[in-house]
Amino acid sequence: MNSTFSKNGFEIIKADDLPALNELQKHVRDISYKLIGTETSENIIGDLNSLHKAFKSPEDANTFRLKLTSQLSSQVDVGTKVFEIFRSKLEPLVGPDILVQKTPNLVFQPPEYPIPTELHRDAPANSPYEVIVWLPFVDCFNTKSMYVLDREHSQIAAEHIKQNPDDKNGFDEILLAHAALMEVPFGSALIFWSGLFHGSIVNKEGESRLSLNIRYKNLFSPAGMKDQLRYFNILQTSQLTDLGLDFQYREQFR
């Protein structure tokens, strides 16, 4: 991992295993089109860009998103699959002893969808030792993407809120001046630190945006304010950790 992530708190990375990502994208497309009862074409990314044509209301689109999340999670070990696709970038960040979010978050934003993702940051409610993988299944650009406030300006914004809790205009000025819309083509992912402010705006690009986000952290890093056992599974452990855990178990119950 180069210094971009350390400096900015985010980085756009390319897949190590593009065939595996293509397979995951096709699986998402196939489940989606089965749910809406429409035949697929040979153009997977074109099918996903056109998903919005099947829905007449935001409520219908959200119901579809929930069903897609449930079916994908029951059919694919998404956390392991995404980690393997981007292993060379993720493992140096979180180490060999890794927790993964139990259920991925799928986000579906049709054009003009009136409920974009509100500006927020995951930490401090979540652990400040988490990395979020934002993986689009289509090419994301301009308003079809999401925006991120880098490390420096996320810290400035957080300090502004602390010192001026009622000054929304001042906070918005920081956001408008420094937030950057990410350009993330399919085949890449945006990884970012849990302490960054991020969100999205109304999609004006005439195509659907379908993406997932999922979180990884080290098994031994501080948990934050959320119960790790409720939100995370163990993805992998090192040989040394396996020995240590076995030793502790035997010492405790012998």
Image (tube, rainbow, N blue to C red):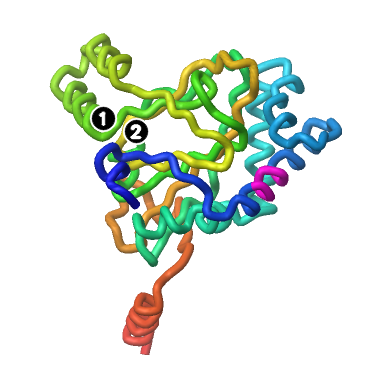
Location of residue 198 (image quadrant): top left
Rendering coords of residue 243 (x, y %): 37, 82
Viewer-nearest residue: 79 or 41: 41
Is residue 70 toward the left or the right of residue 94 in the image? right
Q: Give the quadrant of the C terminus.
A: bottom left
Location of residue 138 (image quadrant): top right
Q: What type is the residue that disc 2 sits on?
A: Arg
Give the distance between the C-alpha atoms of the residues marked 1 and 2, in whole angstroms.
Answer: 9 Å
Query: Which numbered marker is on residue 121?
Result: 2
> Is disc 2 surrounded by few (<14), some (14 to 19) or many (20+) residues within 10 Å?
some
Q: Nearer the viewer, mark 1 or mark 2?
A: 1
Rendering coords of residue 96 (x, y %): 39, 66
Between discs 1 and 2, the one toward the N terminus: 2
Query: Which numbered marker is on residue 3?
Result: none
Rendering coords of residue 30 (x, y %): 76, 41
Residue located at (54% from left, 48% from top): 103
Secondary structure, mark 1, is helix
Residue located at (66% from left, 47% from top): 22
| Residue lying at the far bottom of the rendered structure | 254
Secondary structure, mark 2, is loop
Is residue 71 toward the left or the right of residue 112 in the image? right
| As drawn, 78 above or below 58 | below
Residue 23 included in the magenta stretch of the image = yes
Mark 1 and mark 2 in contact? Answer it, CB < 8 Å: yes
> Is disc 1 surrounded by few (<14), some (14 to 19) or many (20+) residues within 10 Å?
many
Viewer-nearest residue: 34 or 140: 140
Q: What type is the residue that disc 1 sits on?
A: Ser
Residue 221 included in the magenta stretch of the image = no
**Which region is colored magenta?**
22-27
What type of secondary structure mainly makes up the magenta span? helix
Residue underneath mark 1: 154
